[in-house]
Amino acid sequence: MPSTIRPAALLLAGCLAAAGCASSTGLVPLTTAGSLPPDATSTSSTTSTTSTTTTVPRDCAPVVMPLPEVIPPTDASALSVLLSEATFPCADEVTVAAIGDPAAAGRAALHAAGAGGPLLLANATLQGLAAEIDRLDPLVITLAGGIDPLDPVLAGRQTRTMPAGLEIRGGIVQGSAPERLLVVGEAAATAWPAVWAAAVASGDTAVLEQSGDLRATKPARLAAIRSAAGAAASLLGPAGEDTGWQLEVIRSGVELPGGGLLVFPDRRLVAFYGHPETPVLGVLGEQGIDGAAATIERMAPIVASYAAVGIPAIPAFEIIATVASAEAGGDGDYSYETPLGTLRPWVTAAGERGVYVILDLQPGRTDFLTQAKIYEEFLRLPHVGLAIDPEWRLKPDQVHLRQIGSVGADEINQVADWLAAIVRDESLPQKVLLLHQFRYDMIPDRQNLEMHPELAIAVQMDGQGALPTKYETWNALTTQPDSGRFWWGWKNFYDEDAPMATPEEVLDLQPTVYLVSFQ
């Protein structure tokens, strides 16, 4: 634990102001804790000539004490007190700023970090800070943001008003060997200056994250969180109930092909569809059972043609893991379950080469969850998602190609619940759950599907035929009342489409197409 205010902390405090460390800024110069800067007299007002502070030397260097893993949304003033209690045994200088003046609070954070003491945030009065100020017993209290120096809490204490100057900028404090990681959510954003000051003084890492999904945070914040690998994490005013497991996803260091933790909208998946053992079922099988590398090479120019500004294109395999069969088979389900050993080389090659994998299920007379569990080993990998193909989901008296199958929302929700639990258990990035559809009655109650933050649920319009007809189907499926809940995919057929849509035509579709596959 630190025994002195480290020079690195002082340097960080100044440089994070993003405007240099020159003394011409008007800030009170950064000083050794406990001593007053040369201009203190000209900027101070004293409520009493008698100081209650002891003159016995004290060691007020920050001492990092643990915080709860989750601190619910609370008053910013109370949160600043909590941080002070867990960081400072005492303080020769305490900085106090008004919550209602964010700019002053930002300047006060920079000042407090340089002084090596806490920043306390005040509401209308200082009453909520009285006990903590007494515990810290400062030699001087620096006031910012219009704090009244005649407030009764300050009676008998030396005070001064902080001059105008630079304020903190940015939402990251990164310690070199932090013992605590403080992640500040939207509900605690007004307390960020106090967190910033405490983190700089104690050597902690702190990150301000105000998005609704922690996994969507910017790369610099992701890097700061991951760099605090050994630090005890605390969530201050978490953005939502999912923030805890999302933080674990970030700290795992695992990302999706192409980077990041959320599948869409920061990438477009471009997939070859089929089965490795046969070319009859799609272009993916045309390279042969050992053709993963050759397939990736063949895909490259096609993938590149679907890249757009701000949306890079990432290659994907959509592999038919269970194949609809004309025969009932030994288990009577009219579905061939591909052995794991057949698929493993493709899944492995994809992971090594930055290719996403979607395992497609055509279950016949069994249910989707039963078949999905066969491939759980692969679905516990960060680059493998799942596709549900209702066309091949039969009722007990049906056979393939005589009827078009269908599935209800309840069965899909069972799969989604199970898959989402895997994402949480393994601290994985978001996972694709793809739903094939080209008729309403394939998923007749689609509006009852449950959404999961662990999953990027997409609907793929996989009809074939003349392009005008495909456009009609696309418009019908994408203009339903529930359409805005899903990401959308388009499927191209080399032999059946007349003509096959060009990349430009697909990219012009609305809503935006985030997944394109070729069969």
Image: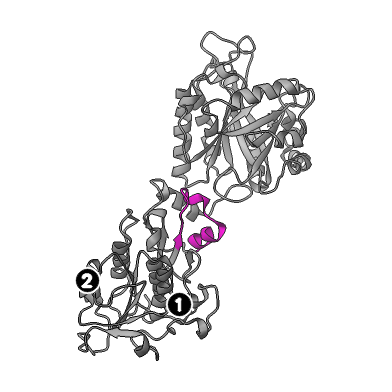
* 395, above or below 182, in the image: above
Q: How is the image coloured?
A: one colour
* 294 horizontally vs 394: left or right: right
Magenta-drawn stretch contains 45: no
Q: Are marks 2 and 1 in contact (CB under 8 Å)?
A: no
In this rendered view, identify the residue nearer to me: 90 or 249: 90
Q: Which residue is mark 1?
A: 9
Amino acid type for the residue under numbered disc 1: Ala
* 6, above or below 216, in the image: below
Whether residue 135 is visible to the viewer of this picture, yes or no, is no
* 447, above or below 224, in the image: above
Quadrant for the N terminus, please: bottom left
Residue 415 at x, y percent in the picture = 48, 30
* 415, above or below 11, in the image: above
Q: Secondary structure at mark 2?
A: helix
Which residue sits at x=29%, y=67%?
Answer: 81
Residue 27 at x, y percent in the picture = 45, 81
* 516 horizontally vs 167: left or right: right
Quadrant for the C terminus, please: top right
Which residue sits at x=42%, y=68%?
Answer: 196
Residue 345 at x, y percent in the picture = 65, 39
* Mark seen at residue 130: 2
Which segment did they paint magenta?
Answer: 207-227
Residue 382 at x, y percent in the picture = 55, 44
* Front disc: 2 or 1: 2
Q: How many marks?
A: 2
Q: Earlier in the sequence, mark 2 or mark 1?
A: 1
Whether residue 15 is visible to the viewer of this picture, yes or no, is yes
Magenta-drawn stretch contains 226: yes
